[in-house]
């Protein structure tokens, strides 16, 4: 057997790995093995994308022939290897996510997190369908949540071109068949920290509806018209993507989301007393002021109480005396920015003849706030359960209630956080959930379009490049 024949047989065996595995996982979802039925729609989307990618892989494979001239054979070999690497790389992320979903160590909390993410996502995307912004088949299945050794959560949906498809795709590409959200492993020990999912879903919704560019443009004009200096306008525009996600966090998670951001953002901030204006995330102190402004602008008394509590108990002057001058102009503009993000009617949200603002995604904020407050009181005291009906309770509000309760726990009761964590999780289990969550509409064409956007050619090194470990700068 000559070299090119051996290479061809070898490549065909390598190309045969994935189809059976993908089909097996879909069958497990369809038969609810290990509770995977709730991910039926996500597995269907994954299967559709992998089928499209495997079809492309097989087309490349068919072009590889032992009888080809050396140069043509080499190019065909390179092309099919790139497809194999890319397809396996994409699937490796989802293999890891699926393994976590069925792990006895993580499945319970991930199941809760998936229901929270799904509730947040569908709350927004069902509105988008209602407003005729998109057809029902044109948005992806809800996000899958997975765990990673990282400091903070990330939504893998940032629109970046894929250059390496592996477990680090958490800073990945908008053409993924389903959105994914990465949560730090250690966060699952604190159920109330799942409020961070509400922000990450905001990134997912933005990618579906393409809101941020209009927001940046109009925010810049709004601030400029009010006399804001150009450098400060640029800073606010740089922060716009994260502020947009925070806006969804406030709308979907209210006071609990704001409390969570304080827990995650503020503890280390005093170590760096330099105002941060050059990053995509707002400076932490400005961000907390902005969240408080958003809570007040919602005109919900319970949110206003939370905003007052935040500003009275968290790091404010004189703790940050040296920052006052640099932060003060931004803090003074927080009300304007908060009002803009919540209440500006966006062209991107106007397709049915009616203009909508972000605030319209969650119309009954007062009702949500009352539900969360009632559950928080029960979780903290064990009283008044009769006021709470799990059948009417949204998954997204359970961690919100837990966070509100956590803020008011008695520090002398050392076992109180454990009890709160377990009681909140047990309450969420009382919420009726379907065993299966299959796709209501066929989205094969849409997923196929996403798959065709993937370009794996960069995954194969040029002649002379090191195909072993990546350089440190790429890690």
Image (cartoon, helix red, strand yellow):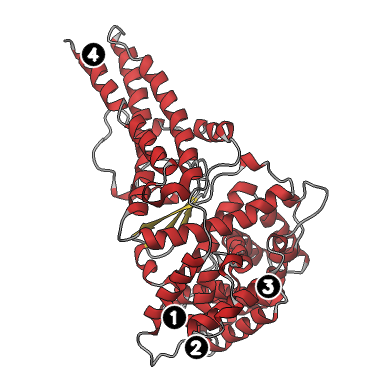
Residue found at x 49% / y 67%: 430
Res. 367 mark: 3
The earlier-in-sequence mark between 3 and 1 is 1
Left or right of residue 294, residue 1 in this image = left
Q: Is residue 412 above or below residue 443?
A: below
Residue matched to label 1: 270
Q: Is residue 215 above or below residue 288?
A: above
Residue found at x 54% / y 55%: 118
- Extreme residue toward the bottom, this view: 412
* Structural crowding at the residue carrying mark 4, measured as other residues with C-alpha within 10 Å and reported as few (<14), some (14–19) or many (≥20): some
* Structural crowding at the residue carrying mark 3, measured as other residues with C-alpha within 10 Å and reported as few (<14), some (14–19) or many (≥20): few
Image depth: mark 3 or mark 1 in front: 3
Left or right of residue 196, residue 76 in this image = left
The Cα–Cα distance between marks 1 and 2, rounded to whole angstroms, is 8 Å
Residue matched to label 2: 319
The Cα–Cα distance between marks 3 and 4, rounded to whole angstroms, is 69 Å
Left or right of residue 390, residue 229 in this image = right
């Amino acid at each position: 057997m000559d070299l090119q024949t051996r290479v061809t047989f070898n490549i065909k065996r390598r190309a045969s790995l994935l189809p059976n595995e993908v089909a097996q996982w879909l069958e497990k979802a369809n038969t609810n093995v290990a509770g995977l039925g709730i991910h039926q729609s996500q597995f269907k989307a994954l299967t559709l994308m992998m089928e499209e990618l495997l079809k492309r892989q097989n087309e490349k494979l068919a072009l590889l022939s032992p009888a080809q001239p050396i140069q043509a054979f080499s190019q065909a070999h390179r092309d099919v290897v790139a497809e194999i690497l890319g397809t396996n790389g994409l699937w490796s992320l989802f293999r890891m996510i699926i393994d976590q979903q069925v792990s006895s160590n993580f499945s319970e909390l991930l199941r809760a997190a998936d229901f929270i993410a799904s509730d947040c996502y569908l709350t927004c995307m069902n509105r988008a369908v209602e407003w005729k912004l998109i057809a029902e088949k044109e948005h992806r299945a809800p996000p899958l949540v997975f765990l990673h050794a990282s400091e903070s959560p990330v939504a893998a949906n940032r629109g970046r071109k894929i250059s390496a498809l592996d477990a680090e795709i958490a800073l990945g590409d908008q053409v993924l068949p389903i959105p994914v959200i990465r949560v730090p492993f250690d966060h699952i020990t604190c159920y109330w920290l799942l409020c961070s999912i509400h922000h990450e879903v905001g990134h997912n919704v933005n990618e579906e509806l393409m809101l941020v560019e209009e927001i940046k443009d109009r925010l810049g004009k709004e601030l400029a018209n009010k006399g804001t200096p150009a450098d400060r306008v640029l800073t606010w525009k740089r922060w716009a993507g994260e502020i947009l996600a925070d806006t969804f966090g406030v709308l979907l998670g209210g006071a609990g989301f704001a409390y969570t951001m304080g827990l995650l953002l503020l503890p280390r901030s005093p170590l760096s007393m330099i105002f941060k204006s050059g990053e995509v995330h707002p400076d932490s102190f400005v961000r907390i002021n902005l969240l408080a402004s958003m809570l007040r602008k919602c005109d919900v008394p319970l949110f206003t109480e939370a905003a007052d509590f935040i500003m009275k108990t968290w790091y404010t002057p004189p703790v940050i005396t040296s920052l006052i001058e640099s932060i003060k102009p931004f803090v003074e503009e927080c009300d304007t920015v908060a009002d803009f993000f919540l209440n500006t009617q966006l062209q991107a949200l106007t397709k049915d003849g009616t203009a909508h603002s972000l605030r319209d995604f969650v119309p009954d904020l007062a009702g949500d706030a009352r539900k969360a407050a009632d559950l928080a009181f029960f979780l903290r005291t064990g009283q008044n359960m009769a006021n709470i009906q799990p059948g009417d309770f949204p998954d997204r509000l359970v961690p919100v209630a837990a966070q509100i309760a956590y803020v008011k726990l008695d520090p002398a009761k050392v076992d109180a956080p454990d009890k709160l964590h377990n009681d909140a999780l047990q309450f969420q289990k009382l919420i009726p959930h379907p065993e299966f969550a299959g796709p209501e509409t066929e989205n094969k064409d849409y997923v196929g379009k996403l798959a065709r956007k993937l370009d794996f050619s960069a995954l194969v090194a040029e002649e002379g490049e090191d195909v072993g470990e990546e350089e440190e700068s790429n890690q």
